[in-house]
Every structure is written in C-alpha cells, then in structure tokens.
Image: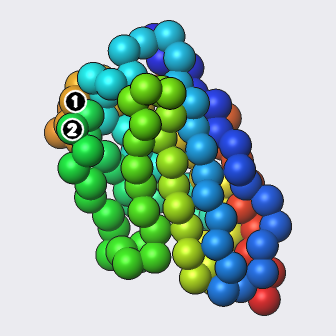
C-alpha cells in the first residue's frame, strides 16, 4: 500500500502561484498513475488532474491552462503547479494514487490533504 504526504499549501493572494508536492512511499511509485483532487467548503470532492506512469496528463476544464501536474520518479514525487489563482479554488488538496499505470485503473490511496487558501 502506498503512503502519500502532501505539502506546499498555504495562503496566497489572488493572481499568485503555488506549487504543491506529494511524496509517495511504500510502493513502486514509477508504475503508478497519480492524481490531484480537491474539496472546497460545502462542495463535493473534485478530481481535476491526473498523470500516467509515462507522463501523459489529463485535466478538468476548470483547471486547464492554469494548473500543471508533473512527476519526478527519481524522488517519488508528484507536483501540482497552480498559477493565476482565484479565491474560488480555495480548498483542501489531496494527492491520489491509482492501482495501475493509467487513470483507467482504480484509485487506491489518498494523502491527508493540504489546505490552499486564496485571498481576494
């Protein structure tokens, strides 16, 4: 079972940028697809970015062009670069791991989350 630890959240002004990191341990990270999801206050959890073991990426329309998911298999880390931040993206952000190498497999692990707050 993989363990995931997110970091990098915090308070940022609207229009700013932030990079989240997620370090994975306990499994073969390089063979796993990874994803980020978020839960805003009073809203359902939303999975919005995913990356295969080979580096192919997929994004929800809500973040396309502003967020970038990437991975460093040497350091067992997946990143989320967030630009042009808006107050409405304030949420707890979670790192996810898939069972397999692509997002067609099931999610089977989640981190504890990191809070991102965007002030207006």
Q: Nearer the viewer, mark 2 or mark 1?
A: 2
**In this rendering, is residue 64 above or below 94?**
below
Query: In this orientation, does residue 69 appear?
Result: yes
In the rendered image, which residue does mark 2 sit on?
Answer: 54
Secondary structure of residue under mark 2: loop
Secondary structure of residue under mark 1: loop
**In this rendering, is residue 33 above or below 57?**
above
Which residue is drawn at the image coordinates 22% and 49% (left, top)?
Answer: 56
Indicate which disc, 2 or 1, sits on the residue closer to the N terminus: 2
Q: How many residues crowd around disc 1 within 10 Å: few (fewer than 14), some, or many (20 or more)?
A: some
Query: In this orientation, does residue 88 appear?
Result: no
Q: Can you give x and y, in whole percent of width and height, for residue 49 in the image?
A: 38, 56
Query: Can you tell which quarter of the image residue 82 is in?
Result: bottom right
Query: Can you tell which quarter of the image residue 106 is in?
Result: top left
Between residues 22 and 114, which one lies in front from this camera angle?
Answer: 22
Q: CA distance from mark 2 to mark 1?
A: 8 Å
Question: How many numbered callouts?
Answer: 2
Q: Is residue 116 left or right of residue 60?
A: right
Q: Are marks 2 and 1 in contact (CB under 8 Å)?
A: yes
Which residue is drawn at the image coordinates 26% and 44% (left, top)?
Answer: 55
Q: Can you give x and y, in whole percent of width and height, for residue 103 in the image?
A: 23, 41
In the rendered image, which residue does mark 1 sit on?
Answer: 101
Q: Which of the image's four quarters has the N terminus? A: top left
Q: Is residue 6 left or right of residue 65?
A: right
Which residue is drawn at the image coordinates 51% and 55% (left, top)?
Answer: 80
The residue at the far front in this view is: 74
Query: Can you tell which quarter of the image residue 35 is in?
Result: top left
**In this rendering, is residue 28 above or below 53?**
above
Q: Is residue 78 left or right of residue 92?
A: left
Q: Can you give x and y, in whole percent of width and height, for residue 23 in the image?
A: 57, 30
């Amino acid at each position: 079972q993989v363990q995931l630890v997110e970091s990098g959240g915090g308070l940022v002004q609207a229009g700013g940028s932030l990079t989240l990191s997620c370090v994975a341990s306990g499994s073969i990270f390089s063979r796993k697809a990874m994803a980020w999801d978020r839960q805003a206050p009073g809203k359902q959890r939303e999975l919005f970015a995913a990356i295969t073991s080979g580096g192919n990426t997929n994004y929800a329309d809500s973040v396309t062009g502003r967020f970038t998911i990437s991975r460093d298999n040497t350091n067992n880390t997946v990143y989320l670069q967030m630009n042009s931040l808006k107050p409405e993206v304030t949420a707890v952000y979670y790192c996810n791991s898939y069972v397999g190498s692509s997002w067609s497999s099931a999610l089977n692990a989640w981190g504890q989350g990191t809070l991102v707050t965007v002030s207006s």
